[in-house]
Amino acid sequence: MANGDMYEGRWQNGMADGWGKKIFSCKDMHEGYYKEDKRCGFGLYSWMNGDRYGGGWKNGRMDGKGVKIMANGDVYNGLWSEDKAQGWGVKIFACGDRHEGFYDQDKRHRYGVYTWDSGDRYEGFWEHGRMSGCGIKNMANGDVYDGEWAEDKADGWGVKVFANG
């Protein structure tokens, strides 16, 4: 191709259409279905930086159910829309933390449960990736806070129970 990309697969009307493999000039690679030169349906994508994705595509973007394994060891398994985590998903972080809940534009949003590798656990509401609204956080040391949150901090009405009384 004129831009340095290489495509091997089914062509129709001068465009990738059907199953094929494309190696981009930047060394990223996609193997899967194409429709009118755009990734669609199921496909596997590998980025030069080591990230990998397997799942649904629509109009050339990650869409529907899919799993992305990041080069840093993080893994997201869930719903996608326009290349962003969107809807219900589970993200397991390389550090051992885990979030299961809703995402909006790649950020934790609405209800979710976040468990830290340290043993702390938050169950409640999120806004723009931060604990916000009502939620309960159980700390590994036995302390518990049940109440309102804003910007990842206890803020507003709430009750904190200390493990040591």
Image (tube, grey):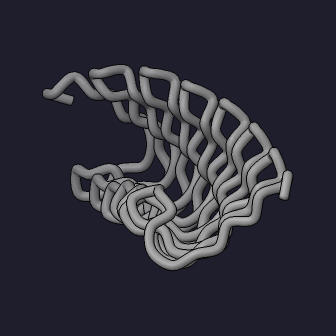
Residue drawn at point x = 84 percent, y = 58 percent: 165
Location of residue 43 in the rendering, given as x and y in whole percent from the top left corner: 53, 50
Location of residue 164 in the rendering, given as x and y in whole percent from the top left corner: 85, 52
Residue toward you, 136 or 164 = 164
Residue drawn at point x = 50 percent, y = 32 percent: 46
Residue toward you, 75 or 67 = 75
Total number of numbered discs in the rendering: 0
Residue toward you, 110 or 149 = 149
Residue sticking out furthest to the left:
2
**Side (left or right) of 27 relative to 36:** right
Residue toward you, 33 or 98 = 98
Location of residue 151 in the rendering, given as x and y in whole percent from the top left corner: 39, 59
**Side (left or right) of 7 relative to 14:** right
Judge whether 77 appears above or below 104 on screen: above
Judge whether 40 appears above or below 52 on screen: below
Quarter where residue 70 is shown: top right
Location of residue 162 in the rendering, given as x and y in whole percent from the top left corner: 77, 58
Q: Judge whether residue 104 can be spotted in this image.
A: no
**Side (left or right) of 107 relative to 26:** right
Quarter where residue 55 is shown: bottom right
Residue drawn at point x = 51 percent, y = 74 percent: 148
Residue drawn at point x = 68 percent, y = 62 percent: 137
Q: Judge whether residue 29 can be spotted in this image.
A: yes
Q: Quadrant of the N terminus?
A: top left
